[in-house]
Image (cartoon, grey):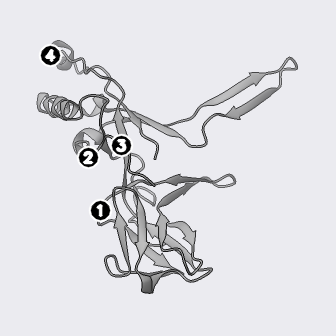
Amino acid sequence: MTQIASFHEVSFPRRLAFGAAGGPRRATEIVTLGSGHEQRNARWSQSRRRYDASQGVRTLDDLYELLSFFEARKGRLYGFRFRDPFDWKSCPPGAVPSSLDQTIGVGDGVAAIFALTKTYGGLDTLARRIAKPVAGSVRLAVAGTELADGVDFTVDSVTGTVEFAPAAVPVSGAVVTAGFEFEVPVRFDADEIVASLSAFEAGEIAAVPLLEILP
């Protein structure tokens, strides 16, 4: 998989991200028939996340940091990493990532490169591609046995892939699992930030929209 073009491998300020609002968005077409019945069609195979970063700005120093980050990204031109305050681990928010959290593939004795994914849902599951794992957070296991990072495998934190060392390539039928922390590749969804001291002192600031860049 090719690297996302025009992307800066930097993280949106963590304390501003913590207060952000937003989440996954879908595009569903609904046609109501003459009988009153509906036909529904999913236009996207994956969700696309949208956030409002203005919720995390609480002080003038926060605003200054936001403006500096925005200028460095040149508005919508360059993407960056963003930690979703609600979904940033391979496990539930209160748990610690384990090498058994997510199934990312099954060995065939030949394949050495696997992509990190996170699966959602019960009856109808969805596998989400994880393109921006946090460096040093990935734990990997094959057939339930945890492996050593840097010895048995390496992680590309830019693309979200793991590569096994030749001696550790999963044998045919061996389930490969992983645990990790991750960030979302996003960009600003506006080329301006509108702020005023009067609004800020009243506890308000214009929206600062962020939009997920799909890998």
Q: Nearer the viewer, residue 59 or 10?
A: 10
Per the model, the C-alpha gap separating discs 4 and 2 is 26 Å
Q: Which mark is residue 135?
A: 1
Residues at discs 1 and 4 in contact (Cβ within 8 Å): no
Per the model, the C-alpha gap separating discs 3 and 2 is 16 Å
Residue 137's x, y, as percent? 33, 65
**Eyeballing the image, is 128 above or below 64?**
below
Residue 54's x, y, as percent? 29, 28
Q: Secondary structure at mark 4?
A: helix
Of circles 3 and 1, the one toward us is 3
Per the model, the C-alpha gap separating discs 1 and 4 is 38 Å
Residue 68's x, y, as percent? 15, 32
Residue tagged 2: 11
Q: Specify the amino acid type for callout 1.
A: Ala
Q: Which mark is residue 197?
A: 4
Q: Residue at x 42, y 63 (%)?
A: 161
